[in-house]
């Protein structure tokens, strides 16, 4: 079995697509109720429905309210690859593919056997 790792926006799209995704995945009523609050829940639900694992930044909640800060570190740079390595034993996969498009993805590409930056193979 192989493992494929993708950065969400800009890698498999040509621009940020989070707003488009939310309009596709959420009813207008729910979108109006909580654009930011429901976003992590909706993406997590969508990934589970499609058999995909989601590794991402999480929002901090204190006393039942969002604080405006991340819970733990933001999932970029070295933190992105650390979370992947915490979740998967890469030795269990014949090939590990990683796709990125910014400097924040370079650590993710470094742990892969097949790396693509802006859809171009990287040695």
Image (tube, rainbow, N blue to C red):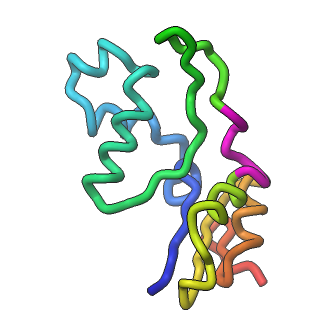
Residue 6: horizontal and vertical position, in percent? 55, 62
Front residue (pair 81, 117): 81
Residue 89: horizontal and vertical position, in percent? 60, 75
Is 36 on the left-hand or right-hand side of 60?
left
Front residue (pair 79, 120): 79
Q: Residue at x 60, y 39 (%)?
A: 57
Q: Residue at x 62, y 16 (%)?
A: 68
Res 35 quadrant in image: top left
Query: In the figure, 70 relative to 5: above or below?
Result: above
Magenta span: chief secondary structure: loop
Q: Residue at x 77, y 62 (%)?
A: 107
Q: Residue at x 61, y 70 (%)?
A: 98
Res 78 quadrant in image: bottom right
Q: Quadrant of the C terminus?
A: bottom right
Magenta span has 77? yes
Front residue (pair 21, 98): 98
Magenta span has 51? no
Is 97 on the left-hand or right-hand side of 22?
right
Query: In the figure, 62 relative to 12: above or below?
Result: above
Front residue (pair 123, 33): 33
The residues colored magenta run 72-79
Residue 99: horizontal and vertical position, in percent? 61, 67
């Amino acid at each position: 079995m192989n493992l494929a790792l993708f950065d969400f926006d800009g890698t498999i799209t040509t621009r940020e697509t989070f707003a488009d995704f939310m309009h596709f995945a959420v009813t207008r009523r729910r979108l109006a109720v909580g654009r930011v609050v429901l976003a992590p829940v909706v993406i997590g639900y969508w990934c589970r429905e499609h058999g995909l694992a989601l590794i991402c930044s999480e929002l901090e909640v204190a006393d039942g309210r969002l604080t405006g800060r991340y819970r733990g570190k933001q999932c970029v740079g070295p933190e992105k690859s650390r979370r992947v390595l915490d979740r998967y034993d890469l030795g269990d996969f014949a090939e590990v593919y990683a796709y990125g498009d910014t400097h924040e993805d370079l650590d993710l590409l470094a742990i892969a056997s097949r790396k693509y930056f802006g859809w171009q193979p990287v040695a």
